[in-house]
Amino acid sequence: MSQQVPVDAADLEQRIGRLANLKRAIATAIVGQADVVDQLLIGLLAGGHCLLEGVPGLGKTLLVRTLGEALEMDFRRVQFTPDLMPSDILGTELLEEDHGTGHRSFRFQKGPVFTNLLLADELNRTPPKTQAALLEAMQEKTVSYGGQTYQLPQPFFVLATQNPLEQAGTYPLPEAQLDRFLLQVRVGYPTAIEERDILALTTGSAAQAVPRVMSAADVVRLQRDVRDVYLSDDLLGWITALVRATRPGDLSAPAEVESYVRWGAGPRAGQALVLCAKARALLSGRLAATREDIAALAAPVMRHRLLLSFAAEAEGKSADDVVAALLSHMPPPAA
């Protein structure tokens, strides 16, 4: 049975109010992209990581840097290239000598992964060996090196980008690593009005400072609050049914899944959808998740977890098309 843990209402209301302040702070530097900002904040509150897909020049780096400034958290950016090595991300051991005694010892020099917000830019441009270096950090929030395990700062949030246009010289992310991302966020072009505002904001002499509205400790506390958000048993059953229906051969799978999906989503997709629905509810100032929360996040949660067939590629079908058919085939339980 789902249970709601009692919390101090006044403190919780204050923390929820800070989320609204956070969105306003981000808006001082980011024009539009409301859905993208919401999904990134949902990923942060749910304690997961986000994979951003969009063409260059849409402000992905600026967005995560702005988020780090507004949250008073450390931000690092790593440009992934074909010659990048795992030690360039995780760190390496340095041989040091004590000039007084002549004693030599190794010291671990931490790499850029030891931060709160890590922007992994063009993650699919580096070989699988280097991509895999992030797996432990993303899942366990630790780094193992030289027989020692090092804890990463909390909170730890990876924001990775990949370019959907250029595939030459890229290394597609393996399914195991894609599954580590809580959400895959699509970044589209701005509207005409938003693009005009971007030009006005970025070509003038005045630069508006991003206000600091929350601390890392506030984020960690909100991540705990997310798990206290109520989700009814009916909605939990609906999420379970949706995830299972993505698997070909399941009795509840619609025709689109049988025709276009080679491999469906695993249990981690269900965990992600539950947490993201709760985080969206909290971001909206609610203490209970709804059907709308689940439906709004079904595609970002599952689009990178579905392995499509050759028939889907031939007919121009995307993972979002399959998720849309899934939601139509399996409507939510009655309120």
Image: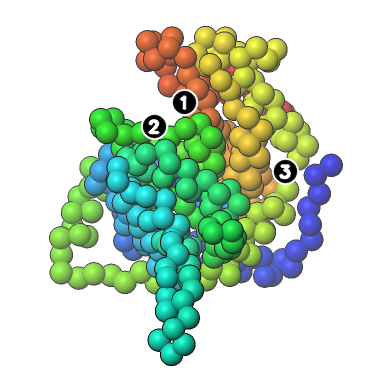
The residue nearer to you, when weighing 258 against 39, is 258
Q: Amino acid at mark 3?
A: Leu
Question: Which comes sooner in the sequence, label 2 or label 1?
Answer: 2
N-terminal label among 2 and 3: 2
**Do the residues under discs 3 and 1 have CB atoms within 8 angstroms?**
no
Observer-side mark, 3 or 1, equals 1
**How far across and down, in percent of the image, does residue 274 sit?**
65, 41
Q: Nearer the viewer, mark 2 or mark 1?
A: 2
Q: Residue 48 at x, y = what percent?
A: 55, 49
**SS for tag 1?**
helix
Q: Name the residue rendered at 52%, 46% in the picture.
A: 135
> Tag 1 or tag 3, which sits nearer the N-term?
3
User: Label 1, on which residue?
Assistant: 320
The residue that label 3 is drawn on is 231
Q: Which residue is mark 2?
A: 172
Find numbered disc 2 in the image and state the secondary structure of the residue it sits on. loop
Q: Pick the quarter of the image with the N terminus.
A: top right
Residue, x 61% and y 14% (percent of image)?
248
Q: Residues within 10 Å of mark 1 (few under 14, many from 20)?
A: some
State yes or no: discs 2 and 3 in contact (Cβ < 8 Å): no
Of all residues shown, which one is farthest toward the bottom?
100
